[in-house]
Image: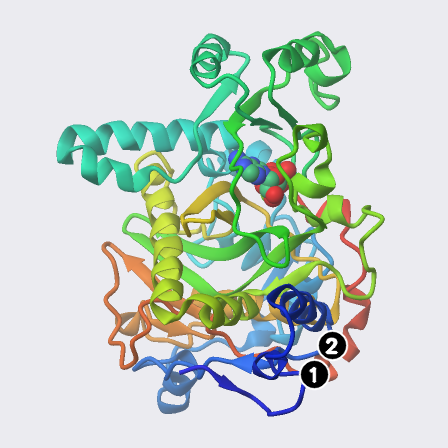
């Protein structure tokens, strides 16, 4: 049941005398306020049978390690560093003597095959993570999965994997794309370089000639970091032209999924996540298709928009989105949408499960970028291997701190949880959603998915004051591809 947290004039329900656009503008203003709490709340779902904290108060594993004995190495000095220090772990720069290494993906590519790891060492990427996180390989793997499922289980089952908008890899699939474009003249496509992030190199087209121009432009066809003769690989993807809008603005959603193992596939999804809004009203007017302030919701792009409000940012918590959708469309719709997002995430992981090199030393925190259209269909835009863990604002800091801390509770380097109790169903904001098969939670509410059901971010407390220097601006180094 939806209820107002207070009866002051700021509640959504006391805006009855306003037009619906005014209400939405008002709500957006309120919820963009970084320091302000959302004004409507959905009652939080009850705890699942065994939560990590309740488990720990009941059980102490005799083999449990002293946190001070745990050594970590990290190339990131942001929220991650604060979180690990807060756990009592010790930072090291030693090349081999560490328990946890938060490594840069370039280190993985260059060194992983040449190092020997002890049983207790844990590292934050799988060797060939790029099968999921490079845009062209993701498309290839999901297309292959669709074919396999269709062969074995039929078209209906295969259609469940239809969550990536029609895509082709350029330059190699150029002829196929041309054929598809001819069937839908005037359709709008988005070009995305496969090896870049933060909206860099993205542009929209509605005429083949616009790609021909791109093909001829030496600055765009050559990657700056690579061999100057190599043509940069792009994917061209059908542009989703009917995004669900709030207050006339487009947004996409970032969700964190933690893979503990690919064999058996073991996936946790965090209840908390956020939406990134554009600062300009959405339009499909062809004269505006080159305006990325309208079409790309990356914070790195929106931050440079003249409409960007530095103090307020351009994000909502997933909690706010869940509440907003609940108030507009009701519980069933929200529940179905959130469950569909969860299954989309699991299915994309299933698409790479067979080719991913499983390794007991590896875990990976992925950042899923998801767009919802006006029919409430979630689309997968991309998966990030190194989602930004640098916080921009106080609540962004709290969100990231919790995700990282909960992740290390799941990984349990301290060995607080005896092996026979693993995997726990709920650890902090992480819910186990798949472990060699979908997890059927014992749900005492009507909620099918807990995505977005996460406690409100508390007022800035000691921990962020103490480590306040780690929420500044998004730095280049924090966003790795
Ligand atoms: N197929 C698409 N349809 C509509 N918008 C898209 C599509 N693909 C990407 N976008 C927009 O562009 C942004 C960047 O795309 P993304 O695939 O996440 O690449 P990047 O690595 O640059 O973040 C997304 O956040 C979204 O706003
Ligand atoms: Mg992205």
Give the side of residue 276 with respect to residue 220, left or right. Answer: left
* Numbered badge on residue 35: 2
Q: Quadrant of residue 384?
A: top right
Q: In this view of the protein, which residue sits in the foreground, 91 or 248?
A: 248
Mark 1 = which residue? 459
Q: Nearer the viewer, mark 2 or mark 1?
A: 2
Depicted 92 relative to depicted 221: above or below: below
Depicted 39 relative to depicted 102: above or below: below
Tell me residue 443's x, y (percent): 27, 77
Rendered residue at 63%/79% (across/down): 17
Give the distance between the C-alpha atoms of the residues marked 2 and 1, in whole angstroms: 7 Å
Rendered residue at 65%/72% (across/down): 398
Determine contact: label 2, label 1, CB under 8 Å.
yes
Q: In this view of the protein, which residue sits in the foreground, 328 or 167?
A: 328
Q: Residues within 10 Å of mark 2 (few under 14, many from 20)?
A: some
Q: Quadrant of residue 276?
A: bottom right
Rendered residue at 43%/66% (across/down): 329
Q: Secondary structure at mark 2?
A: loop
Q: Residues within 10 Å of mark 1 (few under 14, many from 20)?
A: few
Tell me residue 154's x, y (percent): 15, 33
Tell me residue 1's x, y (percent): 40, 83
Quarter of the rendering occupied by the C terminus: top right
């Amino acid at each position: 049941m939806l209820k107002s947290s207070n009866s002051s004039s700021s509640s959504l329900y006391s805006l009855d005398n306003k037009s619906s656009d005014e209400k939405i503008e008002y709500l957006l203003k309120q919820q963009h306020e970084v320091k302000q709490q959302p004004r409507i709340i959905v009652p939080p779902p009850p705890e699942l049978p065994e939560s990590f904290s309740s488990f720990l108060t009941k059980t102490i594993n005799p083999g449990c390690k002293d946190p001070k004995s745990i050594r970590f190495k990290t190339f990131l000095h942001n929220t991650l560093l604060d979180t690990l220090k807060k756990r009592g772990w010790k930072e090291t720069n030693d090349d081999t003597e560490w328990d946890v290494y938060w490594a840069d993906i370039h280190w993985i590519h260059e060194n992983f095959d040449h190092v020997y790891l002890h049983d207790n060492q844990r590292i934050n990427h799988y060797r060939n993570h790029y099968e999921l996180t490079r845009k062209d390989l993701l498309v290839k793997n999901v297309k292959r999965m669709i074919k396999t499922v269709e062969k074995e289980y039929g078209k209906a089952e295969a259609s469940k994997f239809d969550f990536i908008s029609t895509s082709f890899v350029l330059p190699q699939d150029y002829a196929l794309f041309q054929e598809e474009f001819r069937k839908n003249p005037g359709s709008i496509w988005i070009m995305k370089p496969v090896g870049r992030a933060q909206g860099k190199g993205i542009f929209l087209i509605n005429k083949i000639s616009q790609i021909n121009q791109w093909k001829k432009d030496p600055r765009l066809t050559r990657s700056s970091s690579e061999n100057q003769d190599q043509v940069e690989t792009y994917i061209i993807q059908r542009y989703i032209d009917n995004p669900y809008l709030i207050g006339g603005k487009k947004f996409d959603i970032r969700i964190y999924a933690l893979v503990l193992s690919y064999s058996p596939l073991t996936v946790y999804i965090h209840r908390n996540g956020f939406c990134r809004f554009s600062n300009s009203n959405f339009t499909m007017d062809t004269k505006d298709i080159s305006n990325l302030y309208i079409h790309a919701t990356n914070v790195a792009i929106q931050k440079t928009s003249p409409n960007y409000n530095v103090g307020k940012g351009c994000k909502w918590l997933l909690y706010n989105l869940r509440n907003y959708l609940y108030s507009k469309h009701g519980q069933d719709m929200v529940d179905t949408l959130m469950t569909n997002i969860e299954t989309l995430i699991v299915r994309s992981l299933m698409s790479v499960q067979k080719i991913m090199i499983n390794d007991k030393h590896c875990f990976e925190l992925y950042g899923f970028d998801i767009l919802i259209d006006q029919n409430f269909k979630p689309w997968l835009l991309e998966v990030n291997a190194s989602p930004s863990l640098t916080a921009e604002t106080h609540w962004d800091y709290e969100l990231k701190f919790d995700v990282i801390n909960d992740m290390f509770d799941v990984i349990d380097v301290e060995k607080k949880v005896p092996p026979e109790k693993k995997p726990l169903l709920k650890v902090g904001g992480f819910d186990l959603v798949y472990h060699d098969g979908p997890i059927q939670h014992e749900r005492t509410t009507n909620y099918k998915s807990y995505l977005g059901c996460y406690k409100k971010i508390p007022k800035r407390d000691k921990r962020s004051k103490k480590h306040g220097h780690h929420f500044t601006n998004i730095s280049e180094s924090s966003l790795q591809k």
